[in-house]
């Protein structure tokens, strides 16, 4: 087989591969929705008492015990709903990780 005869097939594979790699997956969308819900709750509820800096510091200190420790704390601290709390924890983890990258 001449290499040239492969070209259309290779091109098609590259296109499909690129599309698969770049298209937004259902999982991405669900994760984005979760983060947006977590963020909305934090801005609405937590920011009234905690400044951004204070909240990041408090979250970091709780995260030393792992996401479960933060989850357990928030279950009794303004995020009683478990589904919402999971989104809040995901958002706070992402936010603290992003803040650490800057420093
Ligand atoms: C009514 C005021 C108020 C609201 C609303 C509030 N907090 Fe707090 N939070 C406090 C106080 C007071 C403390 C204890 C003193 C401190 O550590 O700053 C605290 C402590 C914490 C801690 C630290 C615990 C530790 O081990 O140091 C975390 C984490 C935290 N809050 C996260 C949140 C999150 C997330 C929300 C929103 C879901 C929230 N807080 C909403 C007042 C509030």
Image (cartoon, grey):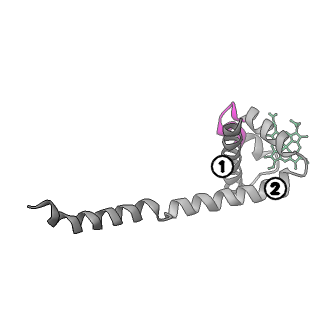
Position of residue 67 in the picture relative to residue 75 (left or right): left
Find residue 81 and report its horizontal and vertical position in percent: 73, 55
Q: Which secondary structure type mostly characterizes the magenta part of the structure? A: helix
Identify the residue at horizontal 77%, vertical 51% (top origin). 79
Mark 1 Cβ and ligand 1 under 8 Å apart: no
4 or 96: nearer the viewer: 4
**What segment is highlighted magenta in the picture?**
63-71
Where is mark 1, residue-wise? 90
Mark 2 vs 1, N-terminal side: 2
Element class at badge 2 = helix
Residue 81 is covered by the magenta coloring: no
Identify the residue at horizontal 66%, vertical 46% (top origin). 94
The single residue placed furthest to the right in the displayed view is 49
The 10 Å Cα crowd at callout 1, few under 14, some 14 to 19, many 20 or more, is many
Identify the residue at horizontal 90%, vertical 52% (top origin). 48
Quarter of the rendering occupied by the C terminus: top right
61 or 103: nearer the viewer: 103
Where is mark 2, residue-wise? 43
Position of residue 50 in the picture relative to residue 38 (left or right): right
Spatial distance from mark 2 to mark 1, Cα to Cα? Answer: 14 Å
Find residue 96 and report its horizontal and vertical position in percent: 71, 41
Quarter of the rendering occupied by the N terminus: bottom left
Tally of numbered discs: 2
């Amino acid at each position: 087989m001449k290499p040239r005869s492969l070209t259309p097939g290779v091109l098609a594979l590259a296109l499909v591969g690129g599309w698969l790699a770049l298209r937004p997956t259902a999982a991405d969308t669900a994760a984005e929705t979760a983060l947006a819900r977590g963020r909305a709750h934090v801005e609405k509820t937590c920011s009234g008492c905690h400044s951004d800096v204070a909240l990041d510091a408090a979250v970091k200190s709780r995260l030393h015990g792992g996401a479960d420790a933060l989850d357990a704390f928030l279950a009794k601290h303004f995020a009683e709903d478990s589904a919402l709390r999971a989104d809040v924890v995901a958002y706070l983890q992402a936010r603290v990780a992003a803040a650490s990258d800057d420093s």
